[in-house]
Every structure is written in C-alpha cells, then in structure tokens.
Image (cartoon, rainbow, N blue to C red):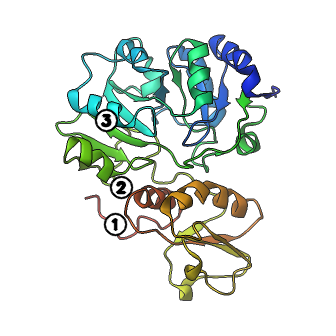
Amino acid sequence: MKQTIIFKKESLNDAAAVLSKGGIVAFPTETVYGLGAVATNKDAVTKVFDAKMRPSFDPLIVHVYDRSQILPLISGEIPELALKLMDEFWPGPLTIILPKSDIVPDVVTSGLDTVALRQPNHPIAQELIRLTGHPVAAPSANLFSRTSPTSAAAVLDMLDGRIDGVVDEGECEIGIESTVITFCEPVPTLLRPGGISRAQIESIIGSIVVLGSLEKKSSAPGRSLRHYAPPCPMYLDLPESKMDKSNAGQICFTADQAIEGFEHCIVLAPNGDPREAAHNLYSALRTLGAIGLTAIYAVTLPEDGVGAAVNDRLRRASVNGFEGMSQE
C-alpha cells in the first residue's frame, strides 16, 4: 500500500507536481473534497476510478481554473444561457454539461459525448489547478456510494494508502456537492440539485426542466439510487411506531424533531437554516456511521432552496428514500 502524502497550502507546488506526473491528489473545494487527476491523462483518471472503486458508468466533473481552459474541452461554442450562468455563479458550486471535444478521454465522461465542467470557488482548488497547468477531473474523494468527505481527515479515513496525496485545508464551506445542469437537451435540464438552487438558476435563464429523481440515466455524477450512504442502514421519514431505537441514532433538521429514546441524536440546523444543515449533513452521517449503530433514522427538510439538495442526498443515502416517489 502506498503512503499518502499530506500537503499543506505552503506545499501546493509539490501537490501540483504529483498531478502533473500522473498522480492522484485529493483537495478541498467549497462543496466537498475532490480526488483529482489531470483530465486529459487517461491513465491518471483511471487511477481515480480504481482508488474510489467507482464504476465506469459514472462520469466525472472536470474542474477548471478559468474559462479559457474550457474551450479546448468542448465542441462548438458555449451557449448563451450557459454563459449567463457562468457570469452569475462561477466560480461556485454549479456544474455545467456541454458537448465534449475529442481531447477529453472517454473514461472521464463514461463514454458520453458530453463533459461536466465547473470552476470551483476555493482558493486552494483554484491555485492547485493553476499550478498544475491542466484541467483536473475530480469526483468526491470517497469510496464509491459512501458519504462524501468535507475534511482531509474524512478523506484519509476512506482512501489512506489508495491515493498519492491530500491537501489539508480545513472543512469545506458548503458541505454538499455542486448543482449539475446540462445544456445538451432541447431545454436546460437540472440533473442534480446542489449548492445553487433551481430558483436561483431560473432567476437568470428562465424555466428549466428537472430530471426525475428515479431516472437511471447516467448523464451526471451522484445520481445512483444508492449513494452518499453511511455503513449502517438509514431510514427516512419513518413514523416513530416503525423505529427500533435500540442501538440506533437520529438525524434531525431542527431540535423540535428530536424523538425521545435515541441515545445518539444530531441536530443539523439548530437555527433552522438549510445551509447549516447542508454544511453539517455528511459530518453527521460519518459521526453516527462510525459508532457501530444498527440503524439511523432521518427526516427530510423543507424543499425550498438548498433543502432540495439535502433531501436528495438523504434519499440516496437511505434504504427507503424513493418509496412511493414517481419519476416525474
């Protein structure tokens, strides 16, 4: 097993050198920690899939330093509506899917003729990509289907010895992954909710289509029906009569949702702020998942704003999150 190097911001040149030579390095973004490889290096990107035990059908997001790095990666011009979103939300937690050029290896896009692109809004991520001199393909730095990491320690818990290095620069600000929207459909289509809400997007470009949660189309990362999961079963929105509280934990949005009888209960947002809940979600899942519980019981948030993204992650992390839901 290889030794995973821990880089600090003072040694970003060393981390960039590892990437430039075909290595894989985890690094912080404003959303979660990503596991990066030079996007045009097929062999390096393959190492990312291997380290994460990620199936080849799940495409990656390519992170860029600025818009000039996009043009070689796409075929054709950037659509006007996509440019409007870039103007408003880049750098930031928004991923935009466009038709890809031939220089993007098929392993990055899972054989699709489209590529997912994002300009992260984190100084370490931006500087690392700039120093590397190439766009960096980077899914979340976790084992596939497990909870995304929001700290270097969480990365090492899952990937220590499986990757070349990790840049340790504290906790991520937002705590859940980016919003994903594609411009490769007749109408702009939201594929994954995230740090930018549907309402924010529609305020800039008008009405969009939202892909149903149960749609199995693998056109964006993080859409597996079982994803972001803790090691024990998690159940969502169950009535108390169906809960077995012995050796179980609860995750609540606010304190008034806490149920008596649970030895372990984490409140995501004591002040009722969905953004605070998003920031704390994965940490809560990791904390409860690490203490050997037999089950976790969680509740959904109001669907407004980032609450929709938190609920998406809760549904994919739970064993019953999509029961009774339609694909529409």
- In primary-sequence order, the first of circles 1 and 2 is 2
* Residue 51 quadrant: top right
Residue 164 visible in the picture: no
Dot 2: what SS? loop
Give the CA distance from mark 3 to mark 1.
30 Å
**Residue for badge 2:** 213
Where residue 195 appears, x then y in whole percent? 45, 48
**Residue for badge 3:** 85
Q: Quadrant of the N terminus?
A: top right
Q: Is residue 202 above or below residue 185?
A: below
Tell me, yes or no, whether the two marked residues, 1 and 2, touch with CB atoms within 8 Å.
Answer: yes
Give the CA distance from mark 1 to mark 2.
8 Å
| The one of 299 and 248 positioned closer to us in this rendering | 299
Give the CA distance from mark 2 to mark 3.
23 Å
Task: Say which residue appears at 52% left-offset and 64% top-offset.
Answer: 319
Position of 132 compared to 219: left or right?
Answer: right
Dot 1: what SS? loop
Where residue 308 appears, x then y in whole percent? 40, 59
From the image, state whether disc 3 or disc 1 is nearer to you: 3
| The one of 307 and 156 positioned closer to us in this rendering | 307
**Which amino acid type is shown beneath numbered disc 2?**
Ser
Task: Say which residue appears at 45% left-offset and 35% top-offset.
Answer: 57
Q: Which mark is residue 325?
A: 1
- In primary-sequence order, the first of circles 3 and 1 is 3
Q: Quadrant of the C terminus?
A: bottom left
Where residue 186 appears, x then y in whole percent? 16, 36
Position of 159 compared to 68: left or right?
Answer: right
**Which amino acid type is shown beneath numbered disc 3?**
Leu
